[in-house]
Amino acid sequence: GLRSKRVCFSFFPLPCFQTEMAEASMDEGTRGLRRKGRGFAESRSEDTATYDSVPTDGQGPGPARSVEGWIVFVTGVHEEAQEDQIRDVFAEYGTVKNIHLNLDRRTGFVKGYALVEYETFKEAERAIEEANGLEVLGQPVQVSWAFVRADGASSKRRSGAHRRGRSPSPDRA
């Protein structure tokens, strides 16, 4: 069976931790095996988790729909732009469902990009075609799809470092 043991550190004002120790038989001459945390075989559930996914239409590479709508990525946004100003510009191309205009924590200014969400593919496509290169608050903006399906060919390396423009690490044998 398992018995609990409390582990406390007197020099820090931290809560005591409880660990479980499995009792080993004395015949084997071993002491108890200490187990902490989750994921032990006896406590593991056989059920597998299910996740929501966006259905694929099998069209190959191209724009991909997010769970809620079609999202376009706007770069080159002026640092003092307001959400209402961006909404007014992009509402000309269709109904804007949502806008994310991320701010720099240190300065409080816009980071230079925005995510604009449309309900339909046609609205988002029209915004990309017509607003790309448009001048907003004196700065030209670039507009493209936020999510794009891969071409289907599996890549040997899909690390984040490659997407960020860093040189890939050497392959290890």
Image (cartoon, helix red, strand yellow):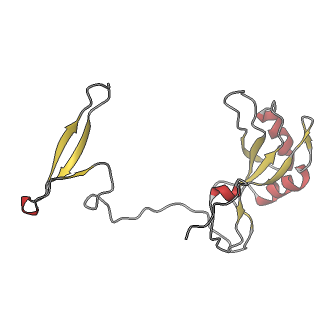
For the point 27% across and 30% down, the residue is 9
Looking at the picture, does residue 50 appear above or below residue 73? below
- Would you say residue 66 is visible in this rendering? no
> In the rendering, at what x and y percent does residue 87 appear?
80, 40
Total marks in image: 0
Q: Is residue 43 above or below residue 78?
A: below
Where does the image place residue 152, in percent across and percent down from the top left? 68, 73
User: Which residue occupies the foreground of this view, 106 or 96?
Assistant: 106
- The reply to whether residue 145 is in sight is yes
The residue shown at (79%, 32%) is 82
Q: From the viewer's perspective, is 100 left or right of 43?
A: right
Q: In the figure, is residue 31 to the left or right of 18?
A: left
- Res 109 → quadrant: top right
State the image coordinates of residue 141 (x, y, percent, origin top left).
87, 45
Residue in the image at 66% along x and 55% along y: 161
Q: Quadrant of the N terminus?
A: bottom left
- Apparent side of residue 62 relative to residue 172 in the rendered image (left or right): right
Name the image quarter holding residue 23.
bottom left
Q: Is residue 20 left or right of residue 135?
A: left
Q: Quadrant of the C terminus?
A: bottom right
Residue 160's x, y, as percent?
A: 64, 56
